[in-house]
Image (cartoon, rainbow, N blue to C red):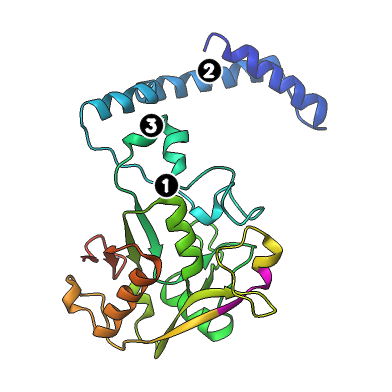
Amino acid sequence: MDTFGDKLDVLFEDAASRFEGFKYSKSMLKEEVEKYKRFAERLEPFIVDTVRVLNESIQQKKKILVEGGQATMLDIDFGTYPFVTSSSPSAGGVCTGLGIAPRCVGDLIGVVKAYTTRVGSGPFPTELFGEEGNLLRNSGMEFGTTTGRPRRCGWLDIVALKYCCQINGFSSLNLTKLDVLSGLPNIKLGVSYNQPDGQKLQSFPGDLDTLEQVQVKYEVLPGWQSDISSARSYSELPLAAQHYVERIEELVGVPVHYIGVGPGRDALIYK
């Protein structure tokens, strides 16, 4: 805090020179410095050298759980640029963001919905429009937590999921919101991309123009009509639901170890 006041003073002077109507005075500076002193006192017990703490914890064989925000397809390097975030929410961000060596990272669990969603603009090859899209959106409560903005919904994109599995090296998947698909007569999986001339793409395209023009080839699976939200073991799921999970495993080459069947913390099946 011994240098904070001087730094804030520079920022205030800069703001006053650029923004008409910004009122700046020394009393205002003093008031803000006092306010942030109180904040500093409250925060101080929680501030540590995280690189040291984490690496000491690794040496002591402590369990460390790292949760990534956003999603791989929003990764600034590997996502659908420019419709991305400003950081690396893929598994590589564990090392670059926390100062943990790659060899220290253990199991990587990929969290994926049983269908695909996207917020805001950007290419979305398997997007559903009209009544089908509304059905998934309403059943899955796909609205922004803060803004309430409706999310775009579509069938599970296996091409994008395989790409995410390659980048992250997932050891297993957590397939969430499987219950949202209950009641649908048929469920589609987007298994490959074709170019407009019919030529199959061998991998997820890095070019945005190509991605916006792809034609998706779908595999149609039978749906299930029963409510699965009370299921707590894999054997309790309808055979069609089991087949859907197992087909995803076959297509992406990564086992599904966890299946979410509802919003509750206990609504989880260990496979």
Q: Tell me, yes or no, whether the two marked residues, 2 and 1, touch with CB atoms within 8 Å.
A: no
- C-alpha span from label 3 to label 1: 14 Å
Q: Quadrant of residue 91?
A: top left
Closer-to-camera residue (44/202): 202
Q: Quadrant of the C terminus?
A: bottom left
Q: Position of residue 82 (x, y in %)?
A: 67, 53
Is disc 3 placed on a helix, strand or loop? loop
User: Residue, x 64% and y 66% (percent of image)?
Assistant: 211
Q: Amino acid at mark 1?
A: Gly
Queried whether the magenta region covers residue 39, the answer comes back as no
Mark 2 to mark 1 CA distance (whole Å) = 35 Å
Q: Where is residue 246 shown, x and y percent of the image? A: 30, 74
Question: Is residue 47 something that shows in the picture?
Answer: no
Residue 12 appears left or right of 69: right
Q: Secondary structure at mark 1?
A: loop
Where is residue 179 drawn, in percent x and y? 33, 75
Q: Which residue is mark 1?
A: 68
Q: Which residue is mark 2?
A: 34
* Residue bearing mark 3: 100
Relative to 156, is 33 above or below? above
Asked if 257 appears above or below 71 in the picture, the reply is below
Q: Earlier in the sequence, mark 3 or mark 1?
A: 1
Residue in the foreground of this view, choosing between 255 and 240: 255
User: What residue lies at 43% left-to-right and 50% top-to-bottom?
Assistant: 168
Please state which amino acid type lies under the numbered disc 3: Ile
